[in-house]
Image: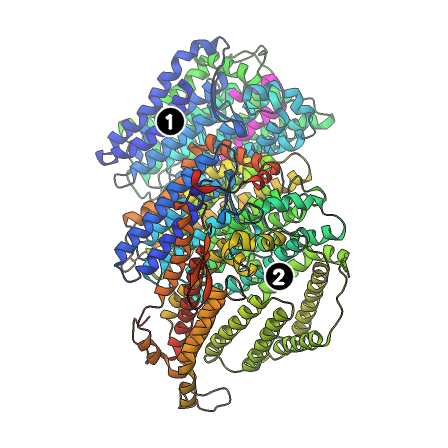
Amino acid sequence: MNHWLTAPIVLPLLGGLLQIFMGYAPLGLRRTLGLATTTLLLVVSVALLMLADDGAYRAYAFGNWAPPFGIVLVLDRLAALMLVVTSVLALFCHIYSTRGTDAVGRHFHALFLFQLMGLNIAFLTGDLFNLFVAFEVLLIASYGLLMHGGGTIRTIPGLHYVVLNLIGSSLFLISAGMLYSVLGTLNLADLAVKVPQVSGSDQVVVQAAGMLLLIVFALKAAVLPLCFWLPQAYSTATAPVAALFSVMTKVGIYAILRVYSLVFGDDAGALAHLGMDWLFPLSLLTLAVGVIGALSAQSLRRLTAWQVIISVGTLLAALSLTSVAGTSAALFYLINTTWVVGGMFLVADLVARQRGSVEDRIVTAPRMRSRTLLSVFFLFGAIACAGLPPLSGFFAKVLILQAVTPGWTMAWLWGVIMVGSFLTLIAYSRAGSIVFWRNVEGHVKDPGRLTLPVTVSAGALIATSIVIVAMAGPISRYTDATAQQLHTPSAYIEILDTPQVNGGSEQ
Amino acid sequence: MTLALVVLLPFLGAIVAPLFAQAGRTAIAIASSLPPIVALAALYPHWSTLAAGGVLVQTHEWLPAIGLSLSFRLDGLSLLFALLILVIGVLIILYARYYLKKHENVGKFYSLLLLFMGSMLGIVLSSNLLLMLIFWELTSVVSFLLISFWNYKQDARRGARMALAVTGGGGLALLAGVLLLGQIVGSYELDDVLAAADTIKASSLYPVALTLVLLGAFTKSAQFPFHFWLPHAMQAPTPVSAYLHSATMVKAGIFLMARLYPALAGTELWFYMVSFTGMATLLIGAYTALFKHDLKGLLAHSTVSHLGLITLLFGMGTKLAAIAAVFHVINHATFKASLFMAAGIIDHETGTRDMRRINGLWQFMPHTATLAMVAAASMAGVPLLNGFLSKEMFFAESLNLNLPGIWAYLPPVVATLAGVFAVAYSARFIHDVFFNGKPVDLPIYPPHEPPRYMKIPVEILVFACVMVGVFPTFAIGPLLYAAAEATLAGPVPEYHLTIVHGFNLPLLMSFLAFFLGLLMYTQRQRFFDFHARFREIDEKAVFEAAVSRVVEWARRFIEVLENGSLQRYVLLLLLATLAVTIVPITSLGFNVGSLGISPIDLPTTVGSLILIGCALGAAAMHRERLYALILLSVVGLMVALTFARFSAPDLAMTQLSVEVVTIVLLMLALYYLPSWTPREASLFRRWRDAIIALVAGSGMFLITLAMLTRPLDSISRYFLENSVEGGGGSNVVNVILVDFRGFDTLGEITVLAIAALGIYAMLRETKLTAPPTDGQGHPWSTDAHPTILKQISRPLLPLALMVSAFIFLRGHNMPGGGFIAGLITAVAIILQYIASGMTWSHQRMPFNLQTPVALGLFIATATGLASFAFGYPFLTSTFSHIHWPVVGDFELASAMAFDIGVYLTVVGATLMILASLGRLTNQSEVKPGAY
């Protein structure tokens, strides 16, 4: 067993603990330690990705209890990809936060690192109940981060967020209980073995549990009609938090992808592709509502928040095709959208800081101090978000469009995505031309200066849309391989054969 | 490699050029003209191959996953367009040097111009449809930035956004069309697509694909009904207009039709769609051009009209028509570019473009006037100029269309009519501007000839017009032939490039158009009066209003959906849950498993009745907060008893202590809330919610019934069997918590720690003013810490701590453990807080409460990490028995250390949460930084 599998979890845990112990140390030191943790996390994630790229499943049995009895971590291509996507985003958000965000409230770095720990548990775990625990860690840390900086404006959407998610947690527990009562196990691989074997009324219980679980994940992913908590929460959160949260909906999507490709995947017999017939129309509706929301947005942050929902719709539409091509396309899109949307939240914040009381609202205001640079950032981000060439969004979109075969599914998917892209284009061009070009006389008192860390972190996230294009070949090869792996659940099941370790003889 | 380099050069230039901005306009113009000149030089060696009918294709792999490759193709057609783009591009660069003012952002201008040039080159040189599409959309984006170059002008911004919406939207249609072609053919390589012409036309997807591709071409080339964006794009600086309207942007759509001509053309659908669109555009553009008083407006609408002409020629579907179309592309580009430049010179020198004010310029700038007049004559189709030749071919082709019955007259009539208008507006351009009396209060008077070098590009282009017009075979013959060959992708029919083909019907049509056009110009005032009766539509305003309407509509729609009501969101969540589970649950029905229903006994019945009653009571009394809380606590206690009744003592103990802590915390929170709330929900809502609750509850009941009556064959058997042997403890629940699933516990105590930190962070800055009285108006008791409570609680503390130590130690084998022990300790300390106040308690616990939390979590983690040292996975436990005098045989498990971590975290976190809440109450009492 490779102990490095635990690193993405233990590292932020220890880093977070260090932050608590050093609660009264100078801020500079805490920042350095926090950033060091995030950087190490990125290094570890990349190493794990290279490890996972051989296509093998690596299981890690906690407490040396062989699966399905103990909890296992499972590293495969998907998990590694999610780790890297998260840690890249996290590093830049973390850098950004060191220019003051971390000082407006207590325990920012600890919460930030615990949040990463929760995310990484969710991506690595091979156990349904442990996934629940990961969701709890995530939820509570994200709630703390959402509230970071305080103020009534954050309290209300934060309350909505936490209440809805606690209901979600209850549903998760009920669902896990139902599955356990019938299948007698919580290990994902073991569940995948047991699901095709049930029949009769047992099968109905499993079906109900599966659908319940889908609701839980859909709430996390912000699928219509469970997405309305998101825009307000994200657009009021501090910038690095909002940017980091562009990966939060992806956790829900990851969970859907993992559970519904493995437990209810191609080999699940009567329950194969459970709920995907619901998911496809809902995801298209989500996309549509996201686009309408983007058009309605009155500030750049809300525009970006609705872009998160657009991404969710697009991603799930591709996933619910339940084909290798669709899954691969969705994963490619996921990388692009997570990073770029994160960057857009940061850019919106930079814009807001230079426009005085108008902040990032889409209205006329005096000219910004750093208009040229910010408008270039926005332009690139908007192009990537709207899926125009030559940036990564376009390639992702083409991959998704190519993933369907002619028929009604294709007509719907293409229709919604095309019309959606068109309206998104209008929304972005309108917002951009008003915010950057429609200026009035006068000047903002004491506009925020662009410092190197914030510029670099916002710019780097936006620039990933170029990097992804440059590396489109290897990335799409990787997502293809990942999709192949996901659509061969039988290989995942083999982790059940993970033996116990005997004595201190192994690596 | 060459071709990729040719495309890449302008992009490199776009990066390098701005660096010369500081060095002045001349320097940057020279720097910018280098890439196109080098590109021309790089293309030159290939001419001999192409003239012989060869095709150069260079392919590099890029993204095979989506069928995208970096493949470039040079044949006659792409060479023709590349030459137009590069040559006119160089001339524009030179021209812009004198057009732009010193203070303008020349760096940005030249950079964008080169980007645009590169994108256009990319379109015409791509041999992969997806690659072409990338450049296609790039031109949309870059033209958006070029049109809005003067972004402080509202018209420029609006014109730019409109252009982006139309061409970008068309690009999306084209993307869909190209993807469909790819689906049909199985490749995006142009060679494959052209070779699969028959497959494409036979495919059931052909009509859809064709429509989508044409949508892309029509929007880009400003065909009716998408023509409206083009005239507004002239808000750009004139060099940009000259470039966009002549050789580039709008020609991209035309190029696409030419490029895919062999693959898509030749069907009825193509014929009707393309030729009728072309006809409509031709007429509308020509008609509107006449009535524009703005010089550039006239030219812009004339561009629309000429694009319609070319489209119509492609639509006709005959080979000769296609050749004529290609020919007219060249001719239009030359005369239109020179005309725009002339208009720019006039604008530059007079300060206006209004033809009602610009008159009689012949006296002031005869040189420019001569050039403009020749170009305008070419636009009108005067013999011995290039415009005439292609127009004659067009007239001839319009006569050759085999339309049924009376429809056969339509094309020639439309062609002639458009010719009439073309002559009329060209005549206006010449006469109104350069003659027709004296100028009317020009902003700049008297106008002068422009700088010498500003005229050179115009001169070159006008010279080309004349050369082609007089010596067509010599000047353009081989290039046109190569282009025609590439367009048709097959044998080129015989055609003659001679000045006059003899006296025939087309020539007659030309004369007719010429005569009627001049007549129309002389009678123009009548037409102006007629036209003035119709309200002019400002497409920009219409577009803007449409966008605003859409935005407004979207806003209202979203406000209805996202109304910020938690009740609404919870309702949606519950309804969604019911919607997806209702089918399986109803099909499950009243399903009792093989275990059957256990007999009903009295204690259980009474207990459940109390539980149900209190739960209902809590819901019913939710507006009276204190009572609701008391009822809730009873529910909690009953749940604890239920656990005890069904032999789950650990759960019962946990539930009990959790219950105590929760209620204390809630009581603290209640202090700040009014003791009751008014009824807010309507009767309908309450009943609706009650029904939803009932349905959800029933569903839950049916599920639970099915679950509990099934024999559980699960992994728990393994836990029972291995607990003592592998985990070293006989309390399976505890062994599961600290060993089998220790990682879950680690996660959960992390949750607890985060919650404590989060609440601390959240409440630290919060200041709440407590109400002076309770809900009924009674003042609070002045005796905050009653003596009796104080006296009882203090001796209780050591006792409670001892109990919790006991519970902790026995945990591994008997009901108990770190979690419960932690809660008991916490409750005992909470009691001290309540009884004696915070200040008193903190004096006796002079440490930071974050420390036990972090320490606990650290101990738990360290226990896990310790296994690494022995080569075992994280959290692997070990245990041995030791003899402890008095206490007896005692088992020491590494899990115990883990449990200490759990214990510390629970105590610390609970107290931290409590202290944070309590701090709000006792702002004055607590010392800053006391915890």
Q: Circle 1 marks a residue in which chain?
A: B
Question: Can residue B385 be seen in this snapshot?
Answer: no
Amino acid beneath label 2: Leu
Q: Is residue B596 left or right of residue B657?
A: right
Residue that appears at 60% across and 56% down: A225
Q: Nearer the viewer, residue A133 or B567?
A: A133
Q: Would you name the residue on which mark 2 appears?
A: B572
Q: Would you name the residue on which mark 1 appears?
A: B89
Q: Earlier in the sequence, mark 1 or mark 2?
A: 1
Q: Is residue A106 left or right of residue A496?
A: left
Judged by depth in the image, the label closer to the viewer, 1 or 2, is 2
Q: Quadrant of the C terminus of chain B?
A: bottom left
Which quadrant of the figure has residue B355? top left
Relative to B636, say whether B588 is above or below: above
Residue A455 at x, y percent in the picture: 32, 47
Q: Circle 2 marks a residue in which chain?
A: B
Q: Quadrant of the N terminus of chain B?
A: top left
Residue A158 at x, y percent in the picture: 47, 63
Q: Are marks 1 and 2 in contact (CB under 8 Å)?
A: no
Do marks 1 and 2 both belong to one polypeptide chain?
yes
Numbered range of the magenta stretch: B301-326
Q: Nearer the viewer, residue B57 or B895?
A: B895
